Image (tube, helix red, strand yellow):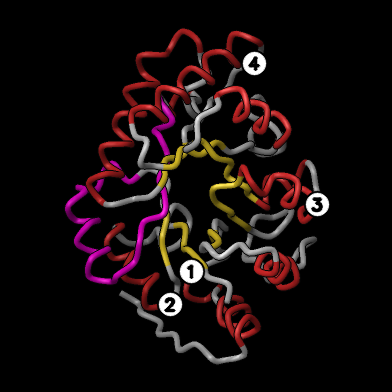
Amino acid sequence: MTKFSANLGFLWTDRPLPRAIIAAKSAGFDAVECHWPYDTPAHEVKSALEETGLTMLGLNTTRGDVATGDNGLSAIPDRVDEARAAIDQAIAYAREIGAKAVHVMAGFAEGSDAHACFVANLEYACRQAPELTMLIEPLNRHDAPGYFLANTDQAQQIITEAGMPNLKLMFDCYHIGRTEGDLLTRFNALRESIGHVQFASVPDRGAPDHGEVNYAWLFKQFDALGWKLPLGAEYKPAGATDDTLAWLTKFVNAGDGKPKMTNTITN
């Protein structure tokens, strides 16, 4: 049966993170993940996770100075100290709340120096927390032009070069669908390097019940190939999150043939 994780960077952003975790549980999600939880005390997040029994699958390193356009730091050669401070912060927070993975954000950069910098920072992250999975995620050129990590071939090269057993690929079906396509073929080719899967409709990044990708079919293929970890719903809801979840009941029911009870909360 396909399992799903709610990405609280986009879902239930109208409430504090602990209450969003409770909402995800009530809606029927099997796990949660987030972007940048650092404004919320870790003990509050941990308490909500314990209350619901959900696992926090992952979180991101900070982007840097967002006001000046930063979107990650780890591939920027003259900002290594900042990048490693962000990695240390993410690891400490992940450990405190029991998260499983950290997405190390590359940032806007290019060239061989950026490549070497990113690999070195990833090696640092992996050594600092061997019990955690370190994820790297290519972002599509339409949404994030100039982002250092741009496609899965580049990501696989970096994973191979770093040679760290806990360095894995974030296989985001939305980003890959926007720039590379052929999602099942890419998934098969990269299967051993994948640490987490995310999804949203292509091309509008909405709920997965419309668009170019037939997710009901794709999720069945992932399941048949042995992928049993929760898939991350990282989409931008058109309106209130609770009003966009018809896909969840449909896809879960399609996976096991049994209805799954869901409850909707409004607070």
Residue that carries the numbered disc 2 in the rendered image: 27
Give residue 50's position: percent from left, percent from top.
Answer: 23, 66
Q: Residues within 10 Å of mark 3 (few under 14, many from 20)?
A: few
Residue that carries the numbered disc 1 in the rendered image: 241
Question: How far is the residue under mark 4 from the one under mark 3?
Answer: 27 Å
Q: Which mark is residue 125?
A: none
Cβ atoms under marks 2 and 1 closer than 8 Å? yes
Q: Nearer the viewer, mark 1 or mark 3?
A: 3
Q: Residues within 10 Å of mark 1 (few under 14, many from 20)?
A: some
The first of marks 2 and 1 along the sequence is 2
The first of marks 4 and 1 along the sequence is 4
Give residue 81's position: percent from left, percent from top.
Answer: 35, 14
In this view, 191 is above or below 87: below
In this rendering, would 143 be left or right of 168? Answer: right
Residue that carries the numbered disc 4 in the rendered image: 110
Magenta-colored span: 37-64
Question: How far is the residue under mark 1 from the one under mark 3?
Answer: 31 Å
The first of marks 2 and 3 along the sequence is 2
Q: Nearer the viewer, mark 4 or mark 3?
A: 3
The first of marks 2 and 4 along the sequence is 2
Q: From the image, which quarter does the C terminus lie in?
A: bottom left
Q: Amino acid at mark 3?
A: Thr
In this view, 40 is above or below 250: above
